[in-house]
Image (cartoon, grey):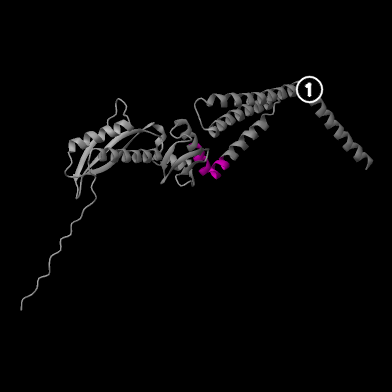
Amino acid sequence: MDEQMNGSWEKLMTKLEGWLDTLITNTPNIILAIAVFTLSYFLSRLFEKSFRKYLKRFIKQTSIRNLAANILSIITLSLGLFLALAILNLDEVLKTILASAGVAGLAIGLALQGTLTNTFSGISLALNEVVHVGDWIDSNGFSGEVLEINLRSIKVKEGDNNIVVIPNKLVLQSPFKNYGLNSRIRTDISCGVHYDSDLEEVRDIAIATIKEIFPPNPLEDIEFYYQEFADSSINFKMRFWINGKKAIDILKAKSEAIIALKKAFDKNDIEIPFPIRTLISQPNEVEKE
């Protein structure tokens, strides 16, 4: 029994001495590996901060900038780790890590397929700069102001103050209207005047009125078209340009145009008629006996 214990003790001491010799022999490599990994850590933080600041010039969405900066930081730190393992001659460990990362990445990709689709859709929206926070958009049957754009969805505040969360892939895959891409919007208004009106005078007064409150730019025109002989009036439509980036701007412009046209027509004795319906009754015939 004592001999067996002594033999085991000797084997243990021999093993520890071997490890100690290996540690002493590889001390320079260990120090160098630690230094490389530490340097890669600080470089990753530096690259992350600098890259996020650089992307601020091109990408307005904070979540997209953070994602790109974090990816660069992880890549830098991973390269430092792999280089440190190579310095320590741990090639087998390195191969095992790479193989495990590949399998894990495949499994995670399959499990998060929908989330990754929304993420890449969000990145695409950010890079193409077709939607920004504060824009008024119509998408997937919803209309409202964009409050937030993140890696999964877009938050839209509708006119009734309700919040709608739309997945990024639905926004990217479906046609949508963004009022915020242009600072000028063309809208229209319809009206009717009495049959006794001077149509040329009506046209000139209407154009002058709209031009005064909504001055057109040099390449823009105020359009005026008579459309039909209606039951009680001759109807016309006007198309003009306004400054605006939201749907509410169109409603405000139409309201101002209606008020201004009504005042101008009243001032010039131009009548906007009520709908008139004439009823003709036939007297009952009295049968003669």
Location of residue 224 (image quadrant): top left
Q: Residue at x 64, y 32 (%)?
A: 95
The amino acid beneath tag 1 is Thr
In the rendered image, residue 254, in percent from the top left (x then y), is placed at 34, 40
Of the 4 image quadrants, the one containing the N terminus is top right
- Identify the main secondary structure in magenta: helix
Q: Nearer the viewer, residue 214 or 40?
A: 214
Q: Give the magenta part as a residue range.
A: 106-120
Q: Nearer the viewer, residue 39 or 212?
A: 212
Asked if the stretch drawn in magenta spans residue 240, the answer is no
Q: Residue at x 12, y 70 (%)?
A: 284
Q: Nearer the viewer, residue 155 or 104?
A: 155
In the rendered image, residue 117, in percent from the top left (x then y), is placed at 49, 40
Crowding around mark 1 (Cα neighbors within 10 Å: few <14, some 14 to 19, many 20+) is: few
Q: Residue at x 46, y 41 (%)?
A: 169
In the rendered image, residue 140, in percent from the top left (x then y), is placed at 42, 45
Pointer 1 residue: 25
In the rendered image, residue 67, in percent from the top left (x then y), is placed at 56, 33
Location of residue 172 (image quadrant): top left
